Amino acid sequence: MGTVSEHSADELHALIGEWMPLPDVAESLDVPVTAVHRLVSEGALLAARVGENGVRQVPAAFVRGGKVLESLKGTVSVLRDAGYEDEDALHWLFTEDESLPGSPVDALLEGRKTEVRRRAQTLAW
C-alpha cells in the first residue's frame, strides 16, 4: 500500500491485466467499500495504484463468485513476513514459476496453497 518498490505501476498493470477498482470489489462482494479497505489492510486482499488515474485496484483473480480467494490471506502473510511490500507480492504472485507450473496465483486458484506457501517461505532466506 506504499509506493511501488521494485516494480513500476505500469509493469504491474500489464503483468496482471484484469483489475477491479475498490468500489467494484465492494459491489462484487456485496459489502461497503470501507470493508474492502479493511480487507486490504488486513492482507486478505492486495491492492495497488495502477492504470491511467493511479486508482487503487485489486487483481480480478482475487475475487471469484462474490468471495475473496480464501487462500490469499495466509499467503500474503507469509510474503509480508518475508519482507515483501504489497506491490512486490503482487508481482511474485502473478509471475510464471516453472516449478509450479504456472504462476503462484494460478496454483492458489487450483487449491494448491501449500505448494505456493512453501515457495513463499523460502523467499525470506
Image (tube, rainbow, N blue to C red):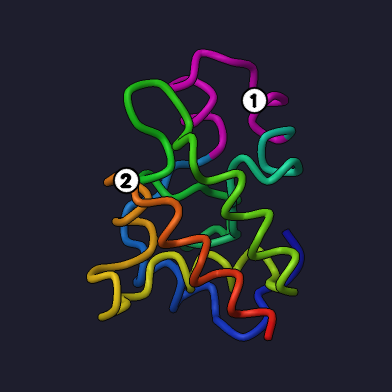
Give the residue drawn at x 39%, y 21%.
Answer: 66
Which range of residues does the magenta coloring cover? Answer: 22-37
What crowding class fits label 1: few (fewer than 14 Cα within 10 Å), some (14-19), or many (20 or more)? some
Q: What element carries label 1?
A: helix
Residue found at x 65% / y 74%: 4
Q: Residue 109 carries which label?
A: 2
Label annotation for residue 33: 1
- In the picture provided, is 64 more to the left or to the right than 82? left
Q: How many marks?
A: 2
Residue 15 to residue 18: above or below: below
**Mark with earlier residue (2, 1):** 1
Mark closer to the observer (2, 1): 2
Farthest residue, direction top: 30
Q: In which quarter of the image is residue 125?
A: bottom right
Q: Is the magenta stretch mostly helix, strand or loop?
A: helix
Check the image and report above or below for 20 versus 93.
above
The x, y position of residue 63, in whole percent, is 41, 35
Q: 65 above or below 104?
A: above
| Residue 34 among those drawn in magenta | yes
